[in-house]
Image: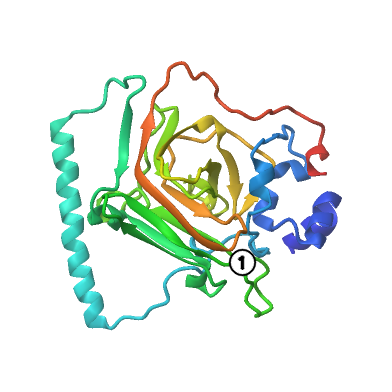
């Protein structure tokens, strides 16, 4: 009933987008400038022209809520009851260990009180196999949506190697329209006993990576999942350009350059990334070029640069109602 009112009675621009299959209900609420937001926002993103051609559009969701935070992409494996009890006891042991570490850290009471300019605080150092236990690699092949594959491994030089094969062949099932992506992502920030937490990066200005690539363009993804379902898939992106060859490169990217996307769609209404609400970091490859890829990573860190005064890199200005919808 309410859906019909939106489609036919409230906003003709929204009706047009619904009929074209461009706008889903969750996007309707997120991009309120389509239906009369008083402060619409337009952004001109220099690197979006490259990224937008490679984004993978999700299917339209005609419901006002989502019951699954993973949108159906979770594991469907079934375990016996005995195996579940064993796994639960092992998980309980790990959670108690994390709880002990939290209590110890609070008793030490040693917070960071000074962020020295030019010094990189390493968040992830890939120098042993245990460092990969906090990361997971996925591809379209894992969900039956393509034929790409990827994996994470430690090289002989004690570096992380994100490698695999990209394949843009679309499965002939009449359901998938685009294929060809691989992704590596860290586990969500959590406290003990599965309590959700966030990375507190609001004192930093740049993300720093020491990588050795193959000349492909990768995509950095900073997830800021919110409480409500329309904010579960909020991810801030920026392109990681690599050069081929035997030499390492140190890439320093300001957080002010990241732009907002949701389910593969660059959002019309942009805003600076909330650095105190980051839940995970990921690196994706989906440039549409078939063949193998290799990205070697030494570390991922953060840096505070007091000379960087930019808050948000993209132009924002107010317009009349519905202008941003065209």
Q: Secondary structure at mark 1?
A: loop
Looking at the image, which is closer to me, 18 or 156? 156
Residue at 49 percent of width and 58 percent of height: 293
Percent across and percent down for residue 37 are 73, 38
Within the image, what quadrant is residue 33 found in? top right
Name the residue located 51 percent from the left edge and 43 percent from the top edge. 243
Residue 86 coordinates in the image, percent (x, y): 19, 74
Viewer can see residue 30:
no
Q: In the visual, does 287 lie left or right of 22?
A: left
Q: Residue at x 70, y 34 (%)?
A: 44
**Quadrant of res 268:** top right
Question: Circle 1 sits on which residue?
Answer: 168
Q: Residue at x 28, y 83 (%)?
A: 80
Quadrant in the picture for the N terminus: bottom right
Q: Is residue 291 above or below residue 326?
A: below
Q: Is residue 132 left or right of residue 7?
A: left
Q: Nearer the viewer, residue 195 or 181?
A: 181
- Above or below, 70 relative to 47: below
């Amino acid at each position: 009933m309410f859906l019909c009112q939106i489609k036919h009675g409230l906003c003709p621009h929204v009706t047009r987008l619904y009929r074209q299959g461009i706008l889903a209900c969750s996007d309707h609420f997120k991009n309120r400038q389509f239906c009369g937001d008083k402060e619409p926002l337009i952004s001109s993103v220099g690197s979006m022209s490259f990224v937008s051609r490679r984004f993978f559009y999700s299917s339209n969701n005609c419901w006002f809520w989502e019951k699954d935070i993973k949108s159906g992409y979770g594991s469907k494996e079934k375990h016996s009851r005995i195996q579940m009890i064993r796994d639960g006891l092992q998980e309980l042991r790990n959670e108690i260990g994390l709880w002990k570490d939290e209590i110890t850290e609070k008793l030490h009471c040693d917070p960071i009180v000074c962020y020295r300019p030019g010094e990189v605080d390493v968040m992830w150092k890939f120098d042993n196999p245990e460092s990969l236990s906090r990361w997971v690699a996925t591809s379209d092949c894992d969900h039956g949506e393509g034929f790409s594959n990827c994996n994470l491994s430690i090289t002989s030089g004690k570096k992380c190697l994100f490698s695999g094969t990209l394949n843009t062949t679309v499965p002939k099932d009449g359901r998938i329209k685009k294929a060809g992506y691989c992704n590596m992502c860290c586990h969500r920030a959590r406290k003990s006993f599965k309590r959700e937490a966030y990375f507190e990066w609001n004192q930093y200005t740049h993300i720093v990576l020491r990588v050795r690539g193959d000349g492909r363009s990768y995509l950095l993804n900073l997830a800021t999942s919110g409480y409500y379902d329309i904010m579960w898939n909020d991810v801030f992106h920026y392109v990681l350009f690599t050069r081929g060859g035997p030499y390492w490169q140190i890439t320093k990217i300001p957080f002010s350059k990241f732009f907002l996307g949701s389910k593969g769609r660059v959002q019309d209404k942009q805003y600076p990334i909330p650095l105190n609400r980051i839940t995970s970091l990921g690196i994706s490859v989906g440039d549409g070029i078939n063949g193998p890829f290799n990205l070697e990573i030494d570390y991922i860190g953060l840096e505070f640069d007091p000379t960087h005064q930019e808050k948000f890199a993209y132009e924002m200005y107010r317009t009349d109602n519905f202008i941003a919808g065209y």
